[in-house]
Image (spheres, rainbow, N blue to C red):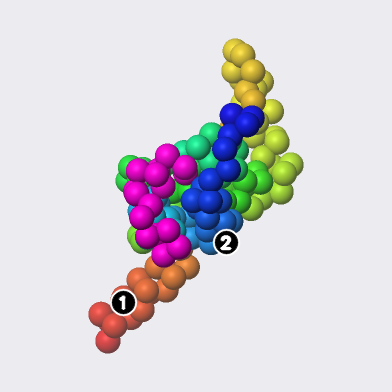
Amino acid sequence: MANMKYSRQRAAIKDYLEHTLDHPTADTVYLQVRKEFPNISLGTVYRNLNLLADMGEAIKISTPDGGDRFDGRVDPHYHVVCRSCGKVYDLTMDEQHSQSITEYADRHFNGTIESHTTLFYGICKECEDQLEHSLEEKSN
């Protein structure tokens, strides 16, 4: 892949990922990139997203609901999935914690651990607030 041909569509996909915090699905990326490239196909978006992930220029996040999400932020960080609304959020922890998890796993594995991904699950603040508001309305 060293001499891959430049693609304006791929560049637009990468640019969109780098400027959103939403961790979009391929469908969302498709709807956004179509504004600039009306003739782009969903298949082209999928291929380019997977290619960017394979090249290390994006992160592919496989979520339990089966929908892959994509992240243009490629520095080491974790993600949290809200069990209520399904949004994916960045969770940045200091590098020491990340490294210690990898080292700990490596000590307990018959082989070599090179890296890891972790997906946390919880309820985001917005959903917590909505739930609290809903409970308050029911008690009145």
Pick the quarter of the image with the C terminus. Answer: bottom left
Q: Nearer the viewer, mark 2 or mark 1?
A: 2
Q: Residues within 10 Å of mark 1 (few under 14, many from 20)?
A: few
Q: Inspect the magenta stretch and tell me whether residue 4 lies in it.
A: no
Q: Which mark is residue 134?
A: 1
Dividing the picture into quadrants, the one containing residue 29 is bottom left
Disc 2 residue type? His
Q: Which mark is residue 8?
A: none
Residue 114 percent across, percent down from the top left: 64, 25
Q: Is residue 108 visible?
A: yes
Along the viewing direction, whichever of 39 and 17 lies nearer the viewer: 39
Q: Inspect the magenta stretch and tell me whether residue 46 lies in it.
A: yes
Residue 67 percent across, percent down from the top left: 35, 46
Q: Residue at x 53, y 51 (%)?
A: 8
Calculate the distance from the C-alpha at mark 2 to the C-alpha at mark 1.
Answer: 34 Å
Q: Is residue 91 visible?
A: no
Residue 31, above or below 48: below
Magenta range is: 34-49
Asked if residue 39 lies left or right of residue 105, the reply is left
Which of the two labelled residues, at mark 2 and mark 1, occupies the earlier sequence position?
2
Q: Which mark is residue 19?
A: 2
Q: Residue at x 71, y 48 (%)?
A: 94
CB of mark 2 within 8 Å of CB of mark 1?
A: no
Q: Residue at x 49, y 51 (%)?
A: 9
Q: Residues within 10 Å of mark 2 (few under 14, many from 20)?
A: few
Residue 133, above or below 40: below
Residue 85, above or below 59: below
Pick the quarter of the image with the N terminus. Answer: top right
